[in-house]
Image: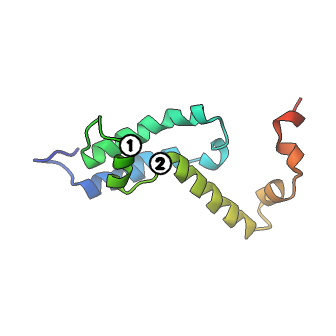
């Protein structure tokens, strides 16, 4: 899709990545974001490969420089931001069915120890 001599430019490739790939990684992240970190890390290579292709980086490029070059956060930071945005939106919508579950349920309902 992109090459130095032909293909789409970096901005177009990043837009395609954000639209086609990152949107799929983000979907449901509020729900699955609380799973174990090693499970969540299985999504990171997909994110990294999409960014590498979009910016034309080598496979050996550091992940931090890849994020900086693409202007993208890590998936972990993105999931945290999306969760905060969801909580803030939910807080302003008291009639939403999820509002009571999130804000009025006792914390013991969510602990692993209380499940049989």
Q: Is residue 85 left or right of residue 111?
A: left
Q: Is residue 49 above or below residue 80?
A: above
What residue sits 50% from the left and 46% below the top?
75
**Mark 1 vs 2: CB contact within 8 A:** yes
> Which percent across, then down, holds residue 37?
60, 36
Badge 1 element: helix
Badge 2 element: loop
Q: Is residue 98 left or right of residue 75?
A: right
**Figure quadrant of residue 15:** bottom left
> Which percent across, then down, holds residue 35?
66, 37
What residue sits 38% from the left and 43% below the top?
63
Residue farthest to the top, as pictured = 116
Mark 1 or mark 2: which comes first in sequence?
1
Residue situated in front as seen by the camera: 71 or 61: 61
Marker disc for residue 63: 1
Q: Which residue is mark 2?
A: 74
Query: 10 Å neighbourhood of mark 1: few (<14), some, or many (≥20)?
Result: some
What residue sits 60% from the left and 53% below the top?
80
**Figure quadrant of residue 47:** top left
Q: Is residue 66 above or below residue 15?
A: above
Query: 10 Å neighbourhood of mark 2: few (<14), some, or many (≥20)?
Result: some
In the rendered image, the quadrant that contains the N terminus is: top left
> Which percent across, then down, holds residue 51?
35, 45
What residue sits 17% from the left and 45% below the top?
3
Q: Is residue 50 left or right of residue 95?
A: left
């Amino acid at each position: 899709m992109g090459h130095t001599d032909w293909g789409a430019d970096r901005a177009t490739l990043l837009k395609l990545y954000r639209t086609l790939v990152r949107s799929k990684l983000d979907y449901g992240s509020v729900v699955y974001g609380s799973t174990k970190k090693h499970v969540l890390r299985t999504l990171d290579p997909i994110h990294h490969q999409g960014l590498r292709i979009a910016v034309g980086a080598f496979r050996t490029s550091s992940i931090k420089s890849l994020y900086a070059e693409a202007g993208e956060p890590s998936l972990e930071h993105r999931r945290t931001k999306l969760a905060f945005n969801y909580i803030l939106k939910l807080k302003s919508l008291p009639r939403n069915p999820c509002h009571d579950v999130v804000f009025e349920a006792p914390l013991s309902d969510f602990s692993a120890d209380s499940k049989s």
